[in-house]
């Protein structure tokens, strides 16, 4: 005679077996198709965190509260947002002008 608990246990084990079979079939299809998740075989390796890297990462994620508008940031914004694009643009325009002069073509207007 089986009790309700043993019947439930048997049903649970049967369900686990069915699910494992389905999972194996899905993995086999994914392996054949070349898609799916890549398996990693690194194991359970201990990770030693670097406190300086973690601190920098936390500050970088919260840039809205960490940003200070001062002379240093104004200089960086000016160089990266104004001077660098201006120099790149002028370099390209001058190259086109030299090429047009060399080829004897009329100069183009760029702005």
Image (cartoon, helix red, strand yellow):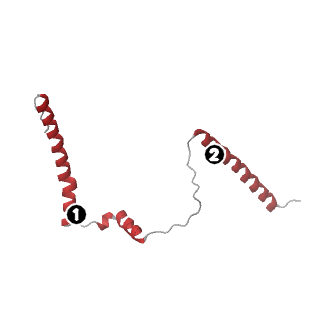
Residue at image location 63% in from the left, 41% down from the top = 29
Residue at 19 percent of width and 62 percent of height:
74
With 27 as the anchor, is 67 left or right in this view? left
Under circle 2, the secondary element is: helix
Q: Which label was assigned to residue 27?
A: 2
Q: Earlier in the sequence, mark 1 or mark 2?
A: 2
The residue at 79%/62% (across/down) is: 5
The total number of labels drawn is 2
- Say if mark 1 contacts mark 2, CB within 8 Å: no
Q: Nearer the viewer, residue 33 or 92?
A: 92
The residue that mark 1 highlights is 73
From the viewer's perspective, is residue 104 above or below residue 25? Answer: above
Image quadrant where residue 40 sits: bottom right
Image coords of residue 59 (percent x, y): 35, 67
Left or right: where 5 falls relative to 105: right
Rendered-image quadrant of the N terminus: bottom right
Residue 38, horizontal then vertical, whole percent: 55, 49
Q: Nearer the viewer, residue 47 or 78?
A: 47
The local secondary structure at tag 1 comes to: helix
> In the displayed image of the protein, which residue is found farthest to the front?
102
- In the rendered image, residue 53, in percent from the top left (x then y), is placed at 40, 67
Whole-Å distance between the Cαs marked 1 and 2? 52 Å
The quadrant where residue 41 appears: bottom right
* Other-residue count near label 1 (Cα within 10 Å), few / some / many at <14 / 14–19 / ≥20: few
Q: State whether residue 16 is above or below residue 45.
A: above
Residue at 22% x, 63% y: name it.
73
**Horizontal side of residue 10 vs 91, given as left or right:** right
């Amino acid at each position: 005679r089986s009790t309700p608990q043993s019947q439930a246990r048997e049903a649970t084990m049967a369900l686990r077996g069915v699910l494992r079979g389905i999972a194996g079939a899905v993995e086999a299809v994914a392996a054949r198709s070349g898609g799916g998740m890549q398996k990693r075989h690194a194991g359970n390796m201990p990770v030693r965190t670097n406190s300086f890297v973690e601190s920098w990462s936390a500050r970088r994620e919260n840039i809205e509260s960490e940003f200070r508008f001062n002379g240093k940031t104004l200089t960086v914004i000016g160089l990266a947002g104004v001077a660098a694009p201006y120099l790149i643009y002028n370099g390209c325009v001058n190259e086109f002008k030299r090429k047009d002069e060399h080829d004897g073509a009329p100069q183009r207007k760029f702005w």
